[in-house]
Each structure stands twice: as C-alpha cells, then as structure tokens.
Image: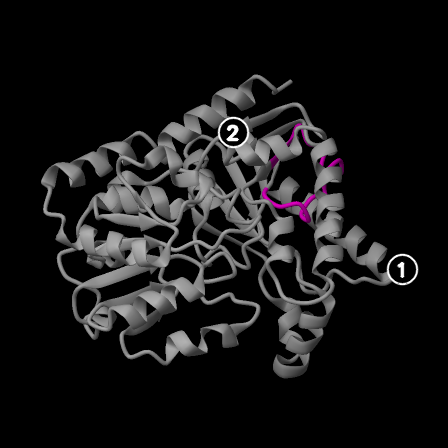
Amino acid sequence: MLSGQNIVCFAPDPSWHHLWRNRHQIMTRLARKNRILFVEPTPYLRPVVADVRQQGLAVLRRSTLFSPMKNLWVYRSPNLYPISGKTPLRQLTFALRQRHLRRTLARLDMAHPILWVFRYDLGEMVGRLDEKLVIYHAVDEYAGYALSSPGPQRHEHAQRILRMERKLLQQADLVFVTSPRLRESKLAWNRHIYVVPNGVDFHHFSRAPQQLPADILSSSPPRIGYAGAINEKIDIDLLEYIARQRPDWSLILVGPVLFKQPERLDALRAMPNVFFLGAKPVQDLPAYMHAFDVSLMPYAHNLWTENIDPLKLYEYLATGRPIVSTSIPAVQEFRDVVRIEDNREAFVLAIEQALEEEMVDMRRKRQDVARQHTWDQRIETLSSIIQGYLP
C-alpha cells in the first residue's frame, strides 16, 4: 500500500455521512498508512443565505473540521466563503477559501499533498496547494447526468460539464476510471488513464445478519430488492411493471430518492406491495441485502448507465443472493453469476427462476467472484500505479 503520503481528497458527497461511495472505501483504507483530508463540497451563496435567514448567523460559525478515524480528517470551507457566480465576489471568496484550506493543511502538517479529485467540478484548487501529484478519478460519464435530466437546457449543461472535465483531464498527472468505456471517452485529453473498477468490503457484506431489520418486517416474502440511489439511472417503468405483474411479491427499495422529477415515483409509491425504506448507513446495508430473496439492478439504458461500474454489483455478489440485471455493459463479464434480461416479461421470468433457485453451489460461486474484487485488492492496484508517478 501507498504509505507516508499526504492526500487531499475532493469529494462530491454533501457530507461524510452521506451514501458511502468508492472514495469513502478508498480513503479509509489509505488512512491506515497515509494522512487524508477529505474535502466536502464548498457551499454556494444562495443556500448559505437561506440558512442564515432560517437559522441565524450561527450558520456562519459552524465547525469545518473533524476526524472520524485516525489519520483522516473531514473538512468543509467555512460558510463565510461560499461560491458566488458574480465578480468580484467570486474571486474574493475563492481567495479566502484557498487561504483557509492552506492554513488547515499547515495545521495538520500536510505539506506537498497528492490531490485526488473525484468529480469534474472540484478542481479549483489544482495548482494552488504546492501539490506533488494531481489525480482525477472519474466514476461516471458526468455529462450523462445532465442528459438524463428533464428540461430544454440539458444539452447545454452537458457541454459545460464536458468542457470542465476536459480542463481537469489536461491538468491531471494521472487519471483513474472505473470502466473501459470511460477510458475510451477521455483518452484524447490525457494518455495516462487506468481502469480500476469498484470493489467490495467482502467481510462486511458477506456476513448474514442475526435478525431482519425492523422496517423490512412490514413486507412479506418473497422480497425483491434494490439498494442504492434512486435516480434517473433506474428504469422506473420496469419496477412498476414488476410490481403490477406480481402483486404477491414485495418490492423493496433501499436508498435515497434523488430523482429530479420526484412525481415520476408517484405511481410506484401508491402500490401496496412497494416499500420505500430510505437511505441506510453503510453498517446497516448488508442486513437489508441479505433480506432480499432476489437482488435487482434495474438500470435504464442511457449514457450514464452505459459507463457505470455499480458498487452494488460487488456487494450483491458478496451476499451470495441471486441477482437479476438489465444488460448494461458492466454486468456482461458476470453472466455466470448474474441473470441478465432487458425484455420486461423475460425480466420477471428471470426473477421467478431466481426465486426457485436452491443451489448452494451458486451462492458460493457468487461469493467466490466477490472475493476477487475486494477493496484491499483495489488499493494495491491504485497504489502501485501511483508509485510510478510520484517524484
């Protein structure tokens, strides 16, 4: 493992305690032998003003640094210095954010860090922290976010995303992506791109719980489940079809609802056999996944899903439970352990076949595959590549 380094991780998560992603898994492991500053996104001016109106000036004095574990600190620049779109306020607040971050790094004795940027719009500090290396880590085709959203401006938004990402690609010394398609789309702007897929904390997700979570007991078996963010990458029409065709099945949805058009979920919410259980902390997720009789990956087909490498694929495999997925590129190499269907009728039939499965060997086979994709293995791969780029 990489060791003795100072790493500043710029993450897009609204808070450290939000839905855990690959950056949380990577940084918590690297903290065993390195010092990590996990930087949450800078607040914008309008939300800060709204919070001040509702909660008072105490909002501006909130703590900006805490340590959830040894060698890892979580940081957010003060609400006093939000991002503003107007000149000269934008330049002034940026200068103040830079000064505050540099002082924080000095206080933590984190000189000449590695900058590890996890989204196209988080590179404002590149070149300003006396860094020794800049890593850009792309986990999605971010223009797909805009193209999957409603509204006439989505194509212009997608182009803005591409311009920002290309600038960051040209600034980076090294780029990690989670799928081959992501590499192909970015090679024109950086030749130092490496595919490192996501992984799984096998020990955590393979352990069956002693009892079912209380909120899942309101549903009756068989339980057909999905765990993850509920957003535009999900085929809502497919989920509605499953729930209508099999009213005796309980369709369990675990995760935050992040749809830009939440009314799209109204029909699904109204069905008596559909259960929205909300977001769960990472320590509780295995209990829900083990409660699923069949785990679903009901992805729509769009630019976003054609480039993803879902964390849940590896987490589902670690539970050993049957998996049914639509035919996105990420699951093609797992055909031996994942049922893949796009046709709605065939998808329901695949779930039925999975429910009838009683093969202990298949459960072991899925878990054996998961063991080949652990986060500890991924960390070794990332570390070996980074070592080759350090001065």
- For residue 4, side relative to residue 220 (left or right): right
Query: Would you say residue 374 is visible in this rendering?
Result: no
Local crowd at mark 2 within 10 Å, few (<14), some, or many (≥20)?
some
Q: Look at the picture and state if 365 lies above or below 263.
A: above
Residue under numbered circle 1: 88
Q: Residue at x 38, y 77 (%)?
A: 269
Image quadrant holding the C terminus, namely: top right
Magenta stretch in the rendered image: 118-136
Image quadrant holding the N terminus, namely: top left
- For residue 120, side relative to residue 364 (left or right): right
- For residue 252, side relative to residue 230 (left or right): left
Q: Are marks 1 and 2 in contact (CB under 8 Å)?
A: no
In percent of width and height, residue 341 lies at 35, 48
The quarter holding residue 29 reads top left
The colour scheme used to paint the residues is: one colour
Give SS at disc 2.
strand
Q: Residue at x 65, y 57 (%)?
A: 146
- Disc nearer the start of the sequence (1/2): 1
Residue under numbered circle 2: 195
Disc 1 residue type?
Pro
Q: Look at the picture and state if 310 lies above or below 136.
A: below
Disc 2 residue type?
Val
In percent of width and height, residue 49 lies at 71, 75
Q: Is residue 132 magenta?
A: yes
Query: Would you say residue 273 is visible in this rendering?
Result: yes
User: Which mark is drawn over residue 364?
Assistant: none
Q: Nearer the viewer, mark 1 or mark 2?
A: 2
The quarter holding residue 185 reads top right
Give SS at disc 1.
loop
